[in-house]
Each structure stands twice: as C-alpha cells, then as structure tokens.
Image (cartoon, rainbow, N blue to C red):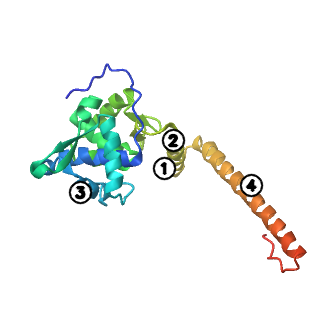
Amino acid sequence: MATDSAAPTAAWPVLQPNERRVLGVLVEKAKTTPDAYPLTLNALVTGCNQKNNRDPVTSLDEVDVEQAVAALKKLGLVQQITGSGRTDKYRHVVYDAWKVDKVQLAILAELLLRGPQTEGELRGRASRMEPIPDLEQLRTQLKALSERGLVVYLSPEGRRGTIVTHGFHAPEELQRQRLRAEVADGSSSEAVDHRPASAPRSASLLESRVDALERELATLKGALAALEARLTAAGLTAPSKME
C-alpha cells in the first residue's frame, strides 16, 4: 500500500507501553510467522514477553494484554476475529489506519517493540521483517514518516548515530526521550568527535543534577538534626551526624 505523502501531519493518539508492545507484536508476527497469524490471546501474551527483539523485556499477563487489546480496538488499530474451533484471535489493521507501506510498517513495528534507537540499529532490526538495503533508503522512509508525525527525530538528522522514535509517546514522555538522546548525543560527540560544542550542554545537565543532589542532602541533614534534637530531649542517644 503506497504512502500518502501529501497527507498533513496527523495528531496521532498516545499509545501506552502495553498497547505499543501488543501492536508491535501483531505486526511482527504477521510478517515473520504468517502461518500462525492472526494470534490467539495466549500467543499474543507469549509474543509480548519473549526475550529477543524486545526492550524492555516484560512479564505481561492475560489481563494486561486483554486491556491493551481493548484500547487498541477502540482506536481502530486491532480487530478480533473468531478462528477455527471458535477461538478468538487478533490482528492489526494499521495499514488502513496509518496509510503506510510494508517497509514503513516494519520500521514502526521495531520502534514500538524497542523504543528509541539509532538509524543503524533500526535498519538492521527492521530488515528482519522487510529488506532495507542501505541507510540511505531507511532515511528516505524515516523522512516520509516524520513528515506525517509517525516518526520523531530525537537528535539532529543526517548525522552519524541519529536517534529516532515513534510518534505515539505522551508529550512528557517524549520530552524525557529527547533529554536522554541529548545526553547520549553529547557523550558520543565527546568520545568520538571531540566536538567542544557538546561540552556546555553536558556540563549544564551535570550541574543541574549536582544541585538537585545538594538540595536532597540539605533536606536529609535538616531531618537528622530534628531527630537528634528530639532524641536528646527524650534522654536517648542521638545517631552520629551525617558528614
């Protein structure tokens, strides 16, 4: 199915972590094990909790997965069908919902299964579902997806180690991802390229963390002093002071 490149950037719904995992598994299994697809609830739970090709590794139960499926059905991303033996099975319908092609869907599935990753990591991982011959072709697809809001760049485009994620994060979660990518990008720049421009950014982040730790230490010292005063008044031995 061809991508509608003329479509405006969409306000895509926020997907919760379990919903992303379930949807990513459905797409992955449709591509890698089509003979066993659509998936039963038990197969979906197993796929969500498998240890390879997942980050983080989870231990979801049937209730967790059923709740995620129910939310995805309301969003029009998953359908429930009755298979042989009247067993309920589940399949995704994101080709229609997102208007993407098969390579773009493989890219999005990997981002749903693993979260933010570099372009190089993403190409290697998505290629197990659909061939992506080189990084340039991946970048072409990422650019098209980003223009529609389905992919978000967490670090500058066109650089080695550019980090991307999917467009289904809540705003506050996306901001945390951006900060992590900034730190990773700054560390990489200092270690590999020795670019001085990244130093002020890293220094600023470090100073903020030190300030926060100093405030926490001051609070703890105050609490300890108050406790010492109460113990002394009660005639009990006070604990040693925090240095």
Q: Which is more foreground, mark 4 or mark 2?
A: 4
The three-letter amino acid code for the residue at tag 4 is Arg
| For marks 3 and 1 on the same chain, the one whose residue lies earlier in the sequence | 3
Which comes before the other along the chain, label 1 or label 2?
2
Residue where numbered disc 2 is placed: 178
- Dot 3: element: helix
The amino acid type, in three-letter code, at marker 1 is: Val
**Pointer 2 local density, CA inside 10 Å: few below 14, some 14–19, many at least 20:** many
Other residues around mark 1 within 10 Å, as few (<14) / some (14–19) / many (≥20): few
Helix, strand, or loop for circle 2? helix
- The N terminus lies in quadrant: top left
Image location of residue 81, percent across then percent down = 18, 42
Which residue carries the number 4 mark?
215
Circle on res. 192: 1
Labels 4, 1: front one: 4
Residue 27, quarter of the rendered image = top left
Residue holding disc 3: 42
Left or right of residue 139, residue 192 in this image = right
Q: CA distance from mark 1 to mark 2?
A: 21 Å
- Camera-side residue: 82 or 122? 82
| Earlier sequence position, callout 4 versus callout 1 | 1
- Cα–Cα gap, marks 4 and 3: 49 Å
Lower sequence index among marks 4 and 3: 3
Q: Residues within 10 Å of mark 4 (few under 14, many from 20)?
A: few
Quadrant of the image occupied by residue 51: bottom left
**Which residue shows up at 52% across the image and 47% down it?**
180
